[in-house]
Image (cartoon, rainbow, N blue to C red):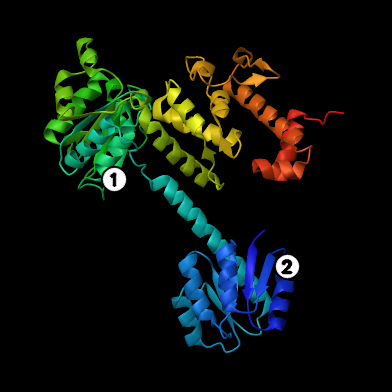
Amino acid sequence: MAKLLIIDDERAIRSTLREILEYESYEVDDIDNGIDGLELIKKNNYDLVLCDIKMNKMDGMEVLENALILKPDLPFIMISGHGTVETAIEASKKGAFDFVSKPPDLNRLLITVRNALDRGTLVTETKVLKRRVSKTRHILGESDSITKIKETIERVAPTEARVLVTGANGSGKELVARWIHEKSNRADSPLIEVNCAAIPSELIESELFGHEKGSFTSAVKQRIGKFELANGGTLFLDEIGDMSMSAQAKVLRALQEHKITRVGGEKELDVNVRVIAATNKDLMKEIEDGNFRMDLYHRLNVINIHVPHLTERTDDIPEIAQNFLEEICGDYGMPVKKISEGAMNALKALPWTGNVRELHNMIERLIILSDKIITENDVIAFANPSGGTNIGAANSNAAPITNGGTALNYEKFSNFQDYKDYAEKEFIKFKLEKNNWNVSKTADDIEIQRSHLYSKIEKFGLKRAE
């Protein structure tokens, strides 16, 4: 339900507008002056403000200017009994969505309100999507290895040198490649990514260099390859160690001559591409085994950046975990949860077979399944039991998670979803009993909607003990 604020010094106008808007199922507040109106705007999250222009104490134009400093995306509809074209233009210049004359035409007013609310929703959604799509995470951590990586990026990025990024899966190789591109002279041009391990060997050449229509059975039209798409920018070849030998030969030629030929084509195409490659394999061993070309290795390995495993830099875990905590809570539109010192120590003690990627998933899991403060027991309870070691033993000082006084047997869960459902059921049951089965209080306590909680109670077949 949209929440609206009416600011007008005429009681009759406020009452009329409020009655109409509440009839349309809007939640409405009203106030008779601009100063108090600004205080309400500071305290509450309004979706729309309807504001008179001529008022005592502070006129509507001042309210508009000050409010948009506080909340730049808040839509304003200005209302005036002395409407002129000049006034409407001035209001628009100052950021108002629209201008309505007194007495307002009710149908026009309702259409204007709906359009303003739709625009506000679109602005918010667009910002969220842009943030999710375009944001490049910072390389977090102050350990010696991470500090060295940051310094190397600063030195290498402005040059045209090729870079080979090595490290285990999930360690952040792609993030290093992104920052090299972001800080390079090619930052305004595209960064094109190719996961060589995800493309079948028979299609990798078409993916990289494109193909001409009819060059093979399924080539029903011409296709532009990644080298052409990255022209003027950067091409990131992830998992380069999984590339086929024939594709390696063509990549080598592209790096040497800055020319490519589409599959099935004869014309040579000039390309200006900076290549950054990454791998989790030991390429020297791959060369010994005959799976990787020595000459390509030396072409790619002008600068080598090795990203350490998370277990090699555990002192960075608190900073990374806190960043993920704020980021994920922000994406979910929920208050940022706190994480206790004991929980942070428990995180540092885990084996992290999935590296930084696993830490991100772990923090998201803790946000969803734990209370307002993430505790040491939460970390032990919700760590993935398939991590390779007994999580309960990851921190020798931590009490094992129990079920009715006995240690929880992870063997009874066939997959993580079963375990997650079990943990969610027990958590909700515990909270309901703690609040004497007061559903409203429990919903507020665990910060979910009451209707959502009822659905969970029904899903898990929870019943109050007689």
Total marks shown come to: 2
Q: Residue at x 36, y 32 (%)?
A: 316
In the rendered structure, which amino acid carries the disc numbered 1? Pro
Of residues 63 and 436, the one drawn nearer to the viewer in this rendering = 436
Side (left or right) of 233 relative to 71: left
Residue depicted at x 22% and y 11%: 290
Q: Residue at 56%, 87% (x, y): give it.
A: 83
Q: Quadrant of residue 358?
A: top left
Query: Which dot marks residue 190?
Result: 1
Residue 199 shows up from this direction: no
Q: Left or right? Give the position of 301 relative to 454.
A: left
Q: Quadrant of the N terminus?
A: bottom right
In the foreground, 271 or 48: 48
Q: Position of residue 154 (x, y in %)?
A: 20, 42
Dot 1 falls on a residue whose secondary structure is loop
Q: Quadrant of the C terminus?
A: top right
Mark 2: amino acid:
Glu
Residue 22 disc label: 2
Q: Nearer the viewer, residue 143 or 153?
A: 143
Percent from the top left, x then y, of residue 147? Answer: 26, 35
Residue 345 visible, this angle: yes
Among numbered discs 1 and 2, the one appearing first in the sequence: 2
